[in-house]
Image (cartoon, rainbow, N blue to C red):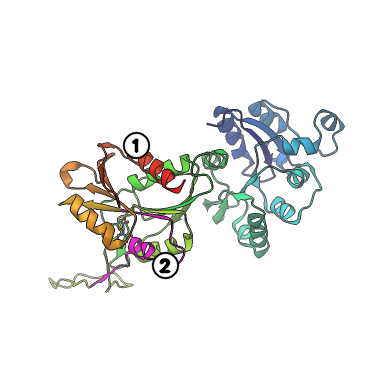
Amino acid sequence: MLASKRILLIISGGIAAYKSLELIRLLKKQGADVTPVLTRAAQEFVTPLSVSALAGEKVYTDLFDLTDEAEMGHIQLSRVADLVVVAPATADLMAKMAQGRADDLASTLLLATDTPVMIAPAMNVRMWDHPATRRNLEVLKADSVSIVGPNEGDMACGEYGPGRMSEPSEILDAIATELTDGPLKGKHVLVTSGPTHEPIDPVRYIANRSSGAQGTAIARALVALGADVTFVTGPADVDPPTGVTLVQVETAEDMLKAVQTALPADAAIFAAAVADWRVASATGRKIKKQNGKLPVLEFAENPDILASVSRMTNGRPGLVVGFAAETDDVIANATAKRVRKQCDWIVANDVSPETGIMGGSENAVTLITPDGAEDWPRLSKTETAKRLADRVAEALA
Ligand code: C5P
């Protein structure tokens, strides 16, 4: 996947530096060449010997190393890569990058480079949330630095929250996406996926049987074609894809807000099984049994996310794709749905229990476009997703 791609990997000084050893191993496995650079602080966490042994390359550490300068000057070192990756990127190194400081080898390379830069921040949650780091992050984004993570979770310092460096496999996926010259490179595609959960009370909810498998496969296929994917998902059974901007939601109303925030997009694919109704009488307290008296739930209609995006007059994605999971008159219902919701395409399928499609690994769909209905054979959800991603790429070309 990354054969002969050259990565300049800058490791700065945080506890997450140990994960960068695994990142080097994964990059090498994909055929990439890795030139490692360690800051002084990084050497307190990982040794140049272990980094160099895994990379199979010399490790660079000093700005004023005359031997290194004679072999390959720091300017040249900053230019030979296809991508400069900073993992972990500490709050301090991010601050230096944002200010354009160059007082050691790592920061000097980052200022001198003319190749794209990606950072995987890692720091304590309060440092990540600090206004200074937020400011620096905005500056770096504006400078076209791509950001991977951080993730939320337990931290080495004993606290919990965002600030954990992304896992090496996630960073690898982001690197692969960045270096993939697929037909969807530079295109932003929004995908909704999974079911929604509509609360009845704090412990009960209404859900549906969507596993999120098809939406997840679609997002993966789009990433593989180089798309920049925002993946808005309800509580799904399957793990979310990597290499996407992940937004996790519970309810239809949350999903609508997340979709609106994620726009603009070149294309939007609505694979989520959104609940049509929410419980209008949802309470903040658990409903108690009342001696045989049954609770009565009142429903309210949820916003139709697909229809609202399809009907946008300003900033509508160029291609809007909906799904129609039906049990009867699949084609007729789906064709009518395309017109009613004003989307461009509908992916229709028969989800009657005997098909095993809902929650299964295969799908048999009909693609409905303004030109008519096209039956696709029964394929794995991965293959169905690849076909759809190819069609999206053709449409956006
Ligand atoms: O009307 P129906 O639920 O069958 O429509 C299915 C399509 O509409 C899917 O693409 C689904 O993601 C989308 N949808 C939506 N918001 C809703 C209901 C459905 O985006 N509230």
Q: Are marks 1 and 2 in contact (CB under 8 Å)?
A: no
225 versus 101 height, above or below: above
**Secondary structure under the numbered disc 1 in the rendered image:** helix
Residue 343 lies left or right of residue 183; in this view the side is: left
The residue positioned 69% from the left and 27% from the top of the image is: 57
Q: Is residue 257 above or below residue 8?
A: below
Residue depicted at x 42% and y 41%: 221
On the image, the x and y values in percent for residue 257 come to: 42, 65
Q: Which residues are magenta?
A: 299-322
* Residue 273 drawn at (x, y percent): 30, 55
The residue that appears at 25% across and 58% down in the rendered structure is 337
Q: Characterize the local packing of mark 1: few (<14), some (14-19) or many (20 or more) Cα atoms within 10 angstroms.
A: some
Q: Residue at x 30, y 59 (%)?
A: 274
Compute the Cα span from label 1 to label 2. Answer: 34 Å
Question: Cβ of disc 1 within 8 Å of ligand 1?
Answer: no
Instruction: Locate residue 32: give its quadrant.
Output: top right
Residue that carries the numbered disc 1 in the rendered image:
383
Location of residue 278 in the rendering, given as x and y in whole percent from the top left corner:
28, 67
- Left or right of 363, for residue 50: right
Q: Amino acid at mark 1?
A: Glu
Task: Give the camera-side residue of 363 and 234.
Answer: 363
Which disc number belongs to residue 313? 2
The residue mark sitting in front, 1 or 2, is 2
Judge whether 193 appears above or below 256 on screen: above
